[in-house]
Each structure stands twice: as structure tokens, then as C-alpha cells.
Amino acid sequence: MSEARLLIRRGGELLAGLVVAALVGALTLTAIDALSLPEPSWLPQALGATVAAGLVALTGWLLLRGGRGGRGVRGNSCGTGERGLWLLGTAGPAFLASSHLGLLLGGTPHYLFGLGGDQLNRVAYVTRFADSPALSDPFYADAAPFYPPQWFWVGGRLAALAGVEAWEFYKPYAIITMAIAGSIAFVSWRWLVPTRLAVLFGLVTAVVGGHTNAYEPYSWILICLLPQVVVATFLLCARAAARSRDPGGGRPTWPLVVTIGVYLGWAALAYTLIAGVAALLVALVVVVNIWRHRAERRVVATLIAHLAAMAGISVALALVSWHRFLLAVLGGAETEASVANDFAPEIGSRWPLPMFEVSAAGLLCLIGVAWVVVTVWPDGTGRFTGRVSASLSARIGDREADSHDDEATHSRPGWPLPAPDRGLVVAQALGLMVLTVFGWYALSGLRAATGSTLLPFRMIPVITLALALAGVIGSLALARWAVTTSPAHSRGRVAAVAVVVAGLASIQMVQHVSEEDSRFAAAARETAAAPTDVLEAIEEMTPGREPSELVVLTSVPTVYAYRPYFTFQAPAQAYATPAGRYTERTDEIREWASIASPRELADAMDSGPFRGPDVMVFDREGSRNWMVPVAINEMPLARNNSREKIRFHPEQFADPELFDVREVGSRVVIVRR
């Protein structure tokens, strides 16, 4: 099969895995909604634990069947066939993720944290694109967008296609995204490691995502593929070096160049920080290989050319969404510094050490550390530790181990371990990811002296996933060692112990719900209902005008989740594009509050540097004050935002020719005529 056909086939397989995962996720959520479990109660967790145990048992049985027989997985008539493993690898992680989050969020139409914090910004972005496919900022009508729109654009267009309100579509879309992540991770790992090991990798990816990154599904869909991209970069460098020495031999390198470049470009369209870390990892792999082959000019030139090609592909894709902001800046548009990197929560103040958590996941990560260190250790020390291991095996009494060399042991059908060379590449890739995360934390700690950060806590899912995947291989290798070094008459019992312990540990991992997600689920259930009175008043007072035609200044920011209004001021500076000039807009609102005459106020709104509001929604404080709160950025302080109450007065709008005023409960809605 030609490389082009192989690339197309793999793209089709990835798409098929995505479709299967989406269908499984949708069916799982539908079934959970039909249960109507009482909330709040512990019944969903009880059901989830039982489902988790059943899935672990089923997966273990199928994987053990896949290891029976003497010919491995392919063509094994008595075991689980390749198609069965593929279905398990795509449907299993999808069911695991969707059932976990679906049961956690039962009884609420909202996703984790409801419409609080970051979620308001995200739901508003989906609402924007459900109204129109045009690239636009989620809040400002007259500013170039800054935050990558890809995931939100897809969600918005799917919501429009399904005819579902965007705020209501957000929850199933986020959950199905998490379901898809583990499935496409399996599919991509299947091209790099044995299929049964890829199944385990897909399931572990789903579990780690549910524990560490469910709050940000649009970053997890990228992180779940990051280890495979790093492995592919190592393989690319090895293949490029071989072809440089023998241009007529070896496999072509362009499929890997295209694949890695497309991933980096997609990441730039979806999440800037992950894209930057991914680009750094790819560059580090290439630079390390350039140093390794520094005496071979042809190899060095080839590696540099490949790095440039990957960068070119990724930049071309990134410009699909970034061109508006770049053109605005190059055209002289005024911007302010982004404050997003100033966010410094407590979790980002200490280095992540998941291997020391007292849990099955922590133990898995600890085994992963050990496996990576042992596998990538320098050759000289490796020979020494190999002799020690052989001596220990002899002392234990392994009477049959001498008849099997290392390669044969690795290829035995009962142990889905990668071949030694591929295992080394995987260990190098996962080890590099761990070191890069620690380096990121070190740089962020140094940057703290300047009052800012590198958002290092966003790297916690990266290091946890890398160590967990390494732990899977390490656990299998440890179990194999325990079995092969045991006396022949007790190997069956040792294998049974390994299977039981692994199964129980897996159940503990799968049924776990993090404390943060529990709080976020509670917040989702406590989310206030839509402000229908305000929305209806705006609709009645602006006949013939679409919501996307209106700029709104409001004390009720949740309106942006329900209607594609533009806003004069974003809910917080961290969510605002630098081209929106958040600070200047706040000063503008303060200035309006000081103007007494309705005519002067209307003129000030029309003559300012920004498009003035068409609608204003204020909170009433007695009969003399109308108030709109504005978030004041205080990052990196622990209390990162404060609220400034900017007060207006009824007489400022007492001209019916200029302003249409209507009291709606505890609020007042004002429309410019």
C-alpha cells in the first residue's frame, strides 16, 4: 500500500473512531437522561461505580481472550479478533467518559460549573457561532477575536444544525468531546503499539481526562494525542536519518511531516497554550536528533527542512483564525496587554507530583516513573542493571527463563508489550513530556518574580497522562517479570493475583470523582434559571432587530449565554480580547456615569472610541440609583477579580426621545431610540 493510501486509510479510521465514539456518547447520555435519578443523592455515584466495575471486568475478559493462542491477535480464531478489539478501543473509552460525566451531571442542563467563571465565556462563544459561522469575538462587535475559536465554532454550527439552543447543546457537546478523546487516542496509538496495549491506552486516557481535565474538554481533545505526536516525531527523525544515508531505502517521511504539521496547526486553532507546548516538544525532539547527528551534514539539513515544513503547515492552518487579529495589529489597531497569564491559583504554586498521590492512579504514575527511568537509562548502566536482574532471577529459581530471550518474551501473545526498540521510543517520548512539564513549572516559577506566570497548572493533565501511559507498560512488564521469575508450579497463581489486583485498581481509578468536579457539578445544579424577563423585555423593546445586531451593557452577564448579543464590556478582563481594550471601556463607563444630561450622555455614547450600547440593563438600588457592576482585574492576587459598582441615575435617561426605559422586577432595561 502506498504511503498516500495509507495516510488516507488512517484518516478514515480516525474519522470512523470519532463517529463510533460520538454515537456511543449520545446513546449513553440519552439512556442516563431516561433514568430520572433523584438529585441530589448518591444513587448516580452508586450506579456509576457498578457500571465502572462491569466495564473493567468486560474489558479484562476481552483482552485476556485476545492474548490466547499462539499467533497473537491477528488471525487468532480462539481469541478476540482485531475488529472486536477495535470496537472495544473506540466504544469503551467513549462509554466510560460519557457515563462518568453524564451521571455526575444528571438533573442539570448545564455542564461543570454551570454558567460561572470560564464556562460563561465558553458558552457565549458557542452561542455566537450558533448564530453565524463568521469568525467573531464572543463579546465585542468591533474588535478582532483573540482566543482560538475552532472547538466553539464546531459546537455552534452543530447546535444550529441540530436546532438546539447553544447553551443547552453545550453540555452534551462537552461530554461527547471527552468521549471522543479516548477513542481517537486508541486509534492513533494502534498505529504505534500492539492493539491490545492501544486499548488500554485509550481507556486510561479516558480515565485521566475525566479526573484532570473534564473542565476543559477542548484542551483534552488535543492533549490526548500529544504523546502520539511526540512518538511520531522521534520516528520521523529516525526515518529521516535513514533516508538521508540511503535516499533509495526506507519509508518516506512526508506522511509524518504532514500529520505532525496538521496537529500543530489544529492545536493553534483550538488552544494556544497546548499548541505552544506541542511545538516546543516537537522542536526539542528534532534539536536533540540534530545534536545526535551533528557530524552528518546531510542528516542535519534534512531534519531542519522537516522542522521548517511542519512549521509551515501549522502556521498556514493557524492563520485561518489568527489572521484577523494579526492584520488588526499590523494595521495599527490599539491593543492592551493580555492579563490571562497573570492568573495564579493555588494549584499552580506547587509542582505536580501525581506519582505520590495515595490512590491507584498515583501508584500507576509511580510505576510509570520507574519504567521510563529504567528504559531510557544509559547503556552502560543498563548492562549493569541487566546483570543484577538476571542474578535475582536465578536466585528466585526461574528454571525456564533461560530458554527465552528478551525479544521472544516481548513478543509472546499473552503480553501486549511493544517491541524493545519501539518501547524505548515510547519511553523517550513520555519522559521528554514529563521533563518539559517540570521545565515549564521552573520557568513559570522564575517568571513569578515579574508578577505573572506561564499558567503551569494547565500542564497537570499532560504530565499525569504521560506517567499513566508509562505506568501501563511498566505494570505489564512488572507482571510479566513476576510470572516468568516464579516457579513453574505457581505461575498460574501469580498471574491470577496480577489480574485481580489490576482489575481492582482499575475499578478504583474509574469510579473516582475528583473533589473539584464534585463542586463544579453542584454549582451546575445551582445555576440560576435564564433571565427570561430581561430577555423578553429586550426582545419587545427592539422589534425588528436580531440579537446579534445589538450591543448590550448589562448587570446580568448570563444573557450572553442565551442570546448572541454583543457586549460593550466583557464579563472579565481575562476573557476579553486585547483588541477590545477592556480598561479603556471601563473608564468610558465611569465617564458616562458622571454625565447628568440625557442629551450629553447620548452624545458621549455616540462619540466614544467604541461602539456604544444599544441596550442597558441595570440593577435597581432603591429609587435613585441604577447600578452596573464591572469586574476589576486583580491578578495574580488570590482574589483575582473585584467588582466595582458604577451607578447611574434615572434623570440621566429622562428623555423619551432618546431612551426607552422599562422596569423589569429588580432591574431596569433601557433601549437607545
Image: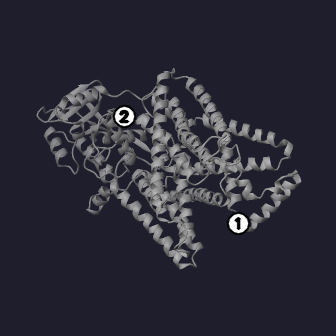
Q: Which residue is mark 1?
A: 378
Residue in the foreground of this view, choosing between 313 and 505: 313
Residue occupying image coordinates x 21% and y 33%: 670
Q: Secondary structure at mark 2?
A: helix
In the rendering, at what x and y percent does residue 20 appear? Answer: 48, 39
Three-letter code, disc 2: Trp
Q: Secondary structure at mark 1?
A: loop
Q: Quadrant of residue 443?
A: bottom right
Which mark sits nearer the N-terminus, 2 or 1? 2
Residue 383 visible in the snapshot = yes
Q: Closer to the camera: disc 2 or disc 1?
A: 1
**Above-or-below relation of 93 to 531:** below
Number of residues whose C-alpha sits closer than 10 Å to that of mark 1, classed few (under 14), some (14–19) or many (20 or more): few
Whole-angstrom CA distance, mark 2 to mark 1, is 54 Å
Question: What amino acid is at disc 1?
Answer: Pro
Q: Position of residue 132 (x, y in %)?
A: 27, 42
Q: Nearer the viewer, residue 500 or 639?
A: 500
The colouring scheme, among rainbow, by chain, secondary structure or one colour, is one colour
Dot label at residue 167: 2
* Coordinates of residue 506 in the picture (x, y in percent): 65, 38
